[in-house]
Image (cartoon, grey):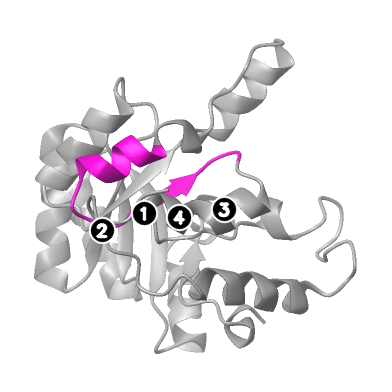
Amino acid sequence: MALRAGVDWLEAGTPLIIAEGMNGVRELRKAFPQTPIVADLKTMDGGWLEAEMMAKAGATQVVVMGQAHRETVELVVRASADFGIEAMGDNLGMPDAIEGARILADLGCHYIIHHIGYDYRTVRRRRGQGAPSPLDQLTEVVNAVAVPVQAVGGLTLQQAIDTPRYGAPLVVLGAPLTIDANAFQTAAGDLEGVLREICAKVHAYGDVPVGKENRL
């Protein structure tokens, strides 16, 4: 359904990988042999082995956490080169999100995920505290690196669609943004139609330059 609607990549999310491991990625690769597949491993250790396993299962991108030891990031990047895939560096929880993005890019990550975590946002709201948005520092993160950036965490659907305006071309359409919380459908019941409309809006931005060339 997503591919018919115009989605470019598929993701094996962290819960799917925890539940099904390499088998989940293998099944996606079997069903969609030509589609890029992101394995959201959130690797914190064992970087070489995890990247190798997912590459052999069919992933084309793997996610490593910036909070990991620098050596782990380096090993994921090295394994990515050896197995012909790409490394995505996630700055979730790093003390300085902008500097963290710069470090991950300098270590060779092909993409930066600028990420505000679900638990952090949820617990702070329950306590009556404000939660930051990835948009708060998105322009600064994009300015800090020369690789594509993706913004994740607490965005509304329209905010996600608008992230290319900040120079961040990778738009993630996770379930919380696209489907009803209690049923696998949109409020109107036409998930594919909604996805098609979203994809058309995102693709209308064309090729978004990375670095400092394109800003809100």
Badge 1 or badge 2: first in the primary sequence: 1
Residue at the spot of label 3: 160
- Indicate whether 162 appears above or below 138: below
Residue 98 sits inside the magenta stretch: no
- CB atoms at circles 2 and 4 under 8 Å apart? no
Look at the image and give the residue range highlighted in magenta: 138-154
Judged from the image, the secondary structure of the residue bearing numbered disc 1 is loop
Q: Which mark is residue 13?
A: none
Nearer to us of marks 1 and 3 is 1
Tell me the quarter of the picture where residue 124 sits: top right
- Indicate whether 202 appears above or below 145: below
Badge 2 or badge 4: first in the primary sequence: 4
Q: Amino acid at mark 1?
A: Gly
Residue at the spot of label 2: 210
79 left or right, relative to 124? left
How many numbered circles are shown? 4
Nearer to us of marks 3 and 4 is 4
Q: CA distance from mark 2 to mark 4?
A: 11 Å
